[in-house]
Image (cartoon, rainbow, N blue to C red):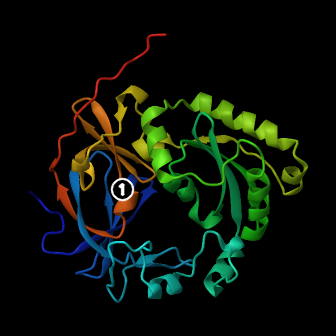
């Protein structure tokens, strides 16, 4: 097979989205460089290896990533994907409002403009969150939201957090969602932008009368369809999406990449889009097999309603 990084040790360090489509962030620890590998329309396979390494650090001021300078190997059962030195150098805590200590990097980052959003994942699943304006809609795409509305823009993270907290106190607005739930909804729930717009509009109408929400600067904007960022166009039909089950898929995935939704790669094989969750693969050493399909998914019969 054609290993794209032959004779190099590489680590899956994350994923992201650009104007050209989704990509994987891969740390080449042999060269000490960060590689961004585009995946949309590409035939490839990933094989997850048992060894784990620190995914490196992130500069909150420049938004640049770098490999771990110490090339630290992580324990198999470690809950962290960064070593202590890289955690300290990055200084980022997404739940800074619950922490007794906020790093100097985080304090400076919090003083930059932030926005608040309502993200739609499936019927009955609308989540509130905040993001730095510097990152554009990257945070929405990383989370795998199918559609979203920006509902407030602020000069700092603390003011944005006040609106987020007010929204999360409302019925039907989630503050967190497990990655496994997002994956299941992607496989099981059909996506329609018009339906997503209605769901977001209903949520906006419901929270608009809440005094704490209005007082925190609630100002909803138009809905965004995020499908083009994931698939280069409309989302595939729901009946073509499957989440393969079986231990044999725990460490290998592959096919023609139809897209990526959040941390879920979508591979096309024999008329079906198979979902490959890779969030838990981050910090693992990998093999990137270019132009190779290293696994064959078993397609389950799909029942399609005519009415």
Residue 163: percent from left, percent from top = 78, 57
Residue sitting at 43 percent across and 14 percent down?
305
Residue 282: percent from left, percent from top = 37, 65
Q: Does the rendering let one see residue 237?
A: no
Query: Where is residue 55, by image quadrant?
Result: bottom left
Residue situated in front as seen by the camera: 41 or 116 = 116
In the image, taking residue 54 as reference, residue 161 lies left or right, namely right
Residue situated in front as seen by the camera: 201 or 94 = 94
Which residue is tagged 1? 278
Query: Where is residue 192, by image quadrant?
Result: top right
In the image, taking residue 176 as reference, residue 46 lies left or right, namely left
* Residue projecting furthest to the left: 1
Total labels: the figure holds 1
Q: Does the rendering let one see residue 44?
A: yes
Residue sitting at 17 percent across and 41 percent down?
296
In the image, taking residue 92 as reference, residue 166 lies left or right, namely right
In the image, taking residue 162 as reference, residue 273 lies left or right, namely left
Q: Is residue 218 above or below residue 240?
A: below
Query: Where is residue 298, by image quadrant?
Result: top left
Residue sitting at 25 percent across and 56 percent down?
251
Does dot 1 land on a helix, a strand or a loop?
loop
Residue 84: percent from left, percent from top = 46, 86
């Amino acid at each position: 097979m054609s290993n794209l990084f032959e004779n190099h040790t590489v680590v899956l360090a994350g994923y992201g989205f650009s104007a050209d489509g989704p990509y994987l962030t891969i740390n080449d620890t042999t060269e000490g460089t960060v590689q961004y590998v585009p995946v949309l329309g590409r035939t490839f396979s990933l094989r997850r290896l048992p060894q784990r390494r620190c995914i490196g650090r992130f500069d909150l001021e420049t938004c640049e990533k770098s490999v771990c300078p110490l090339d630290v190997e992580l324990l198999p059962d470690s809950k962290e994907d960064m070593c202590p030195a890289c955690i300290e150098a990055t200084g980022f805590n997404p739940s800074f409002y619950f922490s007794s200590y906020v790093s100097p990097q985080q304090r400076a980052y919090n003083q930059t403009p932030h926005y608040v959003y309502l993200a739609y994942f499936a019927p009955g699943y609308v989540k509130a969150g905040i993001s730095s304006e510097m990152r554009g809609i990257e945070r929405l795409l990383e989370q795998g939201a199918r559609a979203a509305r920006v509902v407030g823009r602020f000069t700092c993270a603390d003011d944005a957090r006040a609106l987020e907290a007010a929204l999360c106190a409302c019925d039907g607005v989630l503050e967190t969602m497990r990655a496994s739930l997002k994956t299941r909804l992607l496989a099981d729930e059909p996506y329609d932008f018009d339906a997503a717009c209605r769901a977001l509009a209903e949520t906006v109408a419901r929270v608009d009368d809440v005094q704490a929400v209005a007082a925190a600067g609630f100002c909803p904007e138009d809905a965004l369809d995020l499908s083009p960022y994931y698939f280069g166009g409309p989302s595939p039909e729901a009946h073509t999406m499957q989440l393969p089950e079986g231990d044999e898929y725990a460490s290998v995935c592959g096919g023609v990449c139809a897209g990526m939704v959040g941390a879920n790669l979508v591979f096309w094989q024999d008329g079906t889009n198979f979902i490959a969750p890779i969030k838990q693969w981050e910090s693992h050493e990998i093999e990137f097999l270019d132009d190779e399909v290293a696994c064959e998914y078993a397609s389950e019969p799909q029942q399609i309603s005519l009415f």
